[in-house]
Amino acid sequence: MFRADATPVTDATATPVADAAAPVTDATAVPERRRQPLPSAGQEARRVEPRNPHLDNAKYLAILLVATGHAWEPLREGSRAVTALYMLVYAFHMPVFITLSGYFSRGFDASPERVRRLLTGLVVPYVVFEVAYTFLTRWTSQDPDRPISLLDPLYLTWYLAALFIWRLTSPVWRLLRWPMPVALALAMLATVSPSIGDDLDLQRVLQFLPYFVLGLSLKPEHFALVRRREVRLLAAPVLVCALAVAYWAAPRMNYAWFFHSDSARELGVPAWCGPVMTLATFGCSVVLVACFLAWVPGRRTWFTVLGAGTLCGYLLHGFVAQGAEFWGWYDGAWLRQPVGEVVVTLIAAAVMTALCAPAVQRVFRRVT
């Protein structure tokens, strides 16, 4: 969250997961093409289509950005470089996950089996981790009376509530002739409607909605398009320019706009700024998502298998991030130096990698 004077403070609810690259269990943990037999094959010779390594790679790399973004939060104050990197990452890391979540939701038809999987894949983890994070917050904030509220998502759990709503409504979006304009209109209206309240974090659900609808509209050839050589060559200078703009904007812009969790009035600006910033941030984020996907490896790598565990990593790393601040791991002055900032980044990436490992997935399979 941010104050009206645009001075950033730690955002306890900003995230991720997939699905940030994850969910039906994981917005990003669902394969691009399920392992279904090819209809053209014979009954005995039917074969199974594999997962798409490009999208699994994208989910893993994006979840690393979620972890590093949270690790940078305590380091932002007094560091323009860290703030610029933080702003750049938050401009596209959740849009990546949400777009992929929409893409993986194209087959959701509200059938009983699909709804059952939606409940076990999203509602169960939401309840379990909402309760777990409430107890953690009671301990770390020394607020033993903090209530458990399933209507007020705490910390990272907002994404599970949002994904449940988005996926449940996906059949409706596929029926509309112009789904993107409608989704953008709803997002713009949300920014001028502070009365929406905090129930199920609906402000964020509506403001991030266009990215999910965008994913519903994508086809495999769109991912092939961004991986063309000319697009990849163009993506590099675009990302460099985006970082330069973020460095310039760091002391001038309230980057809470990229959190999509507050109305214009709550951010201390005129109402008309909400719709304008909705369109501006959407355009910037979509360009950066395309640049990110352009440079994600399309072949199978050592971390491809980790792309299936991003929901597990996303939900578990919050305990590490919260504990790190509670135990004073950021108290050393050397962490505010370039070497310390690099060390924090590497540790965050290593922790997230470990939490996405298949062994960890198996342990927490029942609740993720």
Image: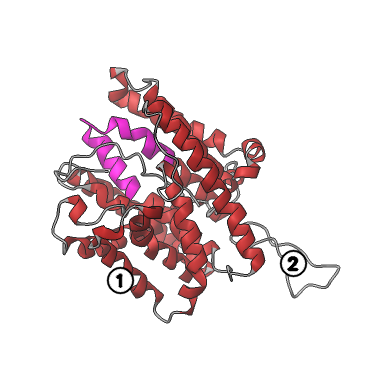
Residue drawn at the location 30% of the way across and 41% of the way down: 85
Left or right relative to 205: residue 40: right
| Quarter location, residue 138 | top left
Q: Secondary structure at mark 1?
A: helix
Residue 49, relative to residue 148: is it above or below?
below
Give, as a three-letter code, the residue at label 2. Pro
Q: Seen in the image, is 367 located left or right of residue 327?
A: right
The disc label shown at residue 275, or none: none
For mark 1, does the 10 Å Cα neighbourhood hold few (<14), some (14 to 19), or many (20 or more) residues? some
The residue singled out by tag 2 in the image is 37
Mark 2: few/some/many CA within 10 Å (<14, 14-19, 20+)? some
**331 or 357, nearer to the observer:** 331
SS class of the residue under badge 2?
loop
Farthest-out residue, bottom? 177
- The residues colored magenta run 66-90
Number of the label disc, if any, that sits on residue 185: 1
Q: Nearer the viewer, residue 78 or 145?
A: 145
Name above or below for residue 148 compared with residue 344: below
Q: Is residue 69 magenta?
A: yes
| Horizontal relation, residue 164 to residue 88: left or right | right
Q: Earlier in the sequence, mark 2 or mark 1?
A: 2
Vertical relation: 236 (above or below) 141: below
For residue 209: magenta?
no
x then y, percent, for residue 366: 65, 44
In the rendered image, the residue lying farthest to the right is 44
Residue 236 appears in view:
yes
Measured from the top left, where is residue 113 in percent x and y? 66, 64
Q: Is residue 261 left or right of residue 290?
A: left
